[in-house]
Image: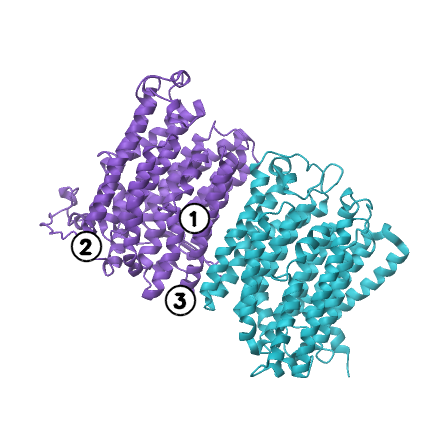
Chain colours: A purple, B cyan
Amino acid sequence: MEGLPILTVMMLVPLAGALACLFAGANAARWIALGATLVTFGFGIVLWSNYQIGGPQWQFTEKADLFAGFSYALGIDGIALLLIMLSVFLMPICILASWDAIQKRVGEYMAAFLFMEVLMIGTFAAQDLFLFYVFFEAGLIPMYLIIGVWGGDNRIYASYKFFLYTLLGSVLMLIAMFWMVAEAGTSDIPTLMQYNFPAEAQTWLWLAFFASFAVKVPMWPLHTWLPDAHVQAPTAGSVILAGVLLKLGGYGFIRFSLPMFPDASADFAWLVFILSMIAVVYTSLVALVQADMKKLIAYSSVAHMAIVTVGLFAFNVQGLEGAMIIMLSHGLVSGALFLCVGVIYDRLHTREIARYGGLAINMPYYALFFLLFTMASIGLPGTSGFVGEFLSLAGIYQTSSLVALVSTTGIILGAAYMLYLYRRVAFGGQTNEDAAAMGDITAREWVMMAPIAAVVLWMGVYPESFLAPMRADIAVLDARLAAAAPASDAQLAPGTPRAEAANALPQHENTDHAGAKEGAH
Amino acid sequence: MDFAPSFALVAPELLLIGAGLALLLVAAWGGDKVARPMAIAAAAALFGAGFMLVPGLHFGTDGPATLAFGGLLKVDSFALFAKALIYLAAIGALMVAPAFFTSAAAGTERVMRAEYPVLVLFATVGMSIMVSANDFMSLYLGLELNSLSAYVLAAILRRDARSGEAGLKYFVLGALASGILLYGMSLLYGFTGGTAFTAVRAGLTGEMGTGALFGVIFVLAGLAFKISAVPFHMWTPDVYEGAPTPVTAFFATAPKVAAVALTARVAFEVFGAQVAAWQQIVMFTALASIIFGALGAIGQENLKRLLAYSSINNIGFILLGLAVANQTGAAAMLVYLFIYVAMSLGSFVALLMLRGEDGALYETFADIRGLSVTRPAIAWALLLFMFSLAGIPPLLGFYSKFVVFQATVEAGLIAFGAIAIAASVIGAFYYIKFVKVMFFDEPAGVVTGKSETGHWALLGLTALIISPIGYLLTPSLTDLADKAAASLFLAV
């Protein structure tokens, strides 16, 4: 693999596919898109298997000075690796989800999705501040088209709202970036992550970045674009929105706000906590009363992402790792839930919960998958959701027991609205004839659901596979934040640390330093 | 006095004047039948004149060797850059004209008047003189030569009421602006004792009296009229809507470049010692243009009117570069100008291609509904132009905003830049409305006509420039703009 610029290749494959799709017929476009995303996923696996855990912080780096002011610098650490994997994993599934559902302008649709993939990989891999901005912002164009052209009835309002909200958030970030580059003299992200900006400047810079990422995450009260966009977007659009685009906000916090402005992050942690606590409780309650399935899942996304932000601003290893795992888990689970909605929406063309009922009788396999993802969303042990939420809440408990207390209600409320949703859709009597006549999931839908289910269980049973690549990066970040970390109110009295990591096998004892350190908490 | 070096410096203008006069004779005898070959000849003359600029542009020229006719004109890198842009825009305006004037879009006449290429040439000569003026006298001469040609161009469809109205409005308001400018110049002459830029600058150094300050403000107000910056923008939408579309495309590009370049030269070379006096005015004008240009566009149904507001909005961003008042800002402004010319020329060409079966032109939002289904190529090109005008990466319009805002922030005007960039989001609203109408709405099916090759070529070229591929141009563009801006600051 030496010498192959794999990140560039991973962006070129979908780009070429996108251009081909623009000029291809409907069926050809579907196959081209599927092929391109699968090849990209294949490269993703190669990327992961060649990623050296415990190796240099930035791997697969590429650099070329391209245009005035920009340099084309790519490179990934463990955090970016996992988010790239999430993107390339979800992409073929999105294409499959749109296979029959999209019938008009298929070529343009597939091209938009492939462009999206290029931009997502680019955003996570960019090591130049302005290159990151270009990828981050360019995603608006395909997403605007996806919602606007192929969306539901109220798609125009939703697409405008999505576009303008996100644009307003990010332009202020651009101004902050100009200032940072002028101050630090470089637009290299790894350098900026170690650069100490003056404390008072950090405040403004943090707020400018916050404006952008808080909209993306989205944090209460800036979340209102999300339910609209989710509900109106086609199924695959919702999957990508929930699965990857929301993660851009969390990634932004972990890559920019926290390491670049640690003092300001500590100063503003209260703001993040208050907004997140409101989000957890408020949006969960809102989700409880939704009559539209997609809207319910959209509000649940806001609540879950609030736990991500809480974990990020806990300023300790557990919080950060938990936030990352929730992001990955939520990307899979909410994506899968949107697919579940899509499956029955394709059959009955309604998202109204009351129109369904008793699907467990006529669609048993569907009900099985739906149940698994519902449980994962609630955070049942054994599924990915549990690992992330547990770590996050354990992390925040060390910083503030009050925030932990309020955030934990999100799990209870989450169980309430998800189980309530599941009961109304899958259990009970078959009140609607047409819903009772629907057939079980097809082979194509099996292929969409089964991989996600497998990864959800994998992440829930053996999260070490996902924690290991980012452990060193989280440790670096934690060290960077240590000086600024706010005082804890939990008054923890640490017990005696165990000698080895919880997962350490005897023969690994000498090599697994990172794991041993993890066990110390 | 030896005039040979002076004539050598103004060789491109001489070529254009010669071509203009010769074509005038051809028009007198040949009539409207030969209008199309005349347009080609005029474009060739512009191309030739543009070719003469290349060595100077490439190597960069400034210093005393660029002064012509005893300091009346100054043909430095800055002037060359502006001229090159003006010639390119004028060629574009000539290329798109014949197909328009000979179709049903041109009303009852259906014939291209032979005066059109001649007037474009003379207007271009006027603009050349404007951007290389080094004396208020030559400035005014160039400005009027350009304006008088432009008034006639606006009214060139003689039987079309809207075109006549546009010409008259343009004339009356243009005359008012010229009056304001002249008054300011006379005040400056009175308080400094000269009309040459160097003399006025010398007179303005140090403490400035109220009279001279009024002179500065009146001159700037007159120039703001010409670049249609808020609060002197009212004429723009009416003129843009009423004038025939090729003429509007011309107005939105070449005279804008000339007037902006002129404003920059006056601000830096003449008022360079009094930056504090004009910087706040320009900052206000820039912000007001961005905000009112964007707000005014929101309710528009007519696409030409909308693009008029969009040009006001863009002038605001260009003035940001001026408000920074340093060399980086000036260079950023020039880069923005180049990209702006490509974007507006492309958008207007796309509008010119929205024709019905009979060749009639469609120019409202209702007409382009669902254009992406009926005419996908035009719709995708317009999509690129609109996102580029909104400054969304990875299109080149982002780069133009990038450089001006970078200059703004580096100069420490952070709050100013933050307000301006937040206001740019208002502008995005109507740019994405374009996309919404073309892509999300059901087809109206009125745009069915064929477009001619020249239009396609220009559309393709401008779309290529503003696409991500256009970033390949940025190194040389930055280089040229830096040289041009440097020559502007040599006098300081």
Q: Which residue is mark 3?
A: A183
Q: Nearer the viewer, mark 2 or mark 1?
A: 2
- Residue B457 point in image, percent of width and height: 68, 48
Asked if the residues shown at circle 3 and circle 2 are in contact, with their CB atoms under 8 angstroms apart, the answer is: no
Distance Cα–Cα, label 1 vs label 3? 25 Å
- Residue B383 point in image, percent of width and height: 58, 45
Q: Earlier in the sequence, mark 3 or mark 2?
A: 3
Vertical placement of A153 versus B418: above or below? above
Q: What is the secondary structure assignment of the residue under circle 1?
A: helix
Which residue is more in the foreground, B68 or A312? A312
The residue under the point 72% across, 45% down is B453
Q: Residue furthest front?
A: B210
Q: Which residue is mark 1?
A: A122
Q: Nearer the viewer, mark 3 or mark 2?
A: 2
Q: Earlier in the sequence, mark 2 or mark 1?
A: 1
Residue B49 in sight: no
Distance Cα–Cα, label 2 vs label 1? 37 Å
Residue A337 in sight: yes
Question: What is the three-letter code of the residue carrying label 2?
Answer: Ser
Question: What is the three-letter code of the residue carrying label 3?
Answer: Glu
Which residue is more in the foreground, B73 or B204? B204
The numbered mark at residue A488 is 2
Specify whether A439 is left or right of B443: left
Q: Chain of mark 3?
A: A
Question: What is the three-letter code of the residue carrying label 1?
Answer: Gly
Question: Mark 1 Cα within 10 Å, few/some/many (few <14, many 20+)?
Answer: many
Q: Chain of mark 2?
A: A
Vertical placement of B301 versus B288: above or below? above
The residue under the point 86% across, 57% down is B27
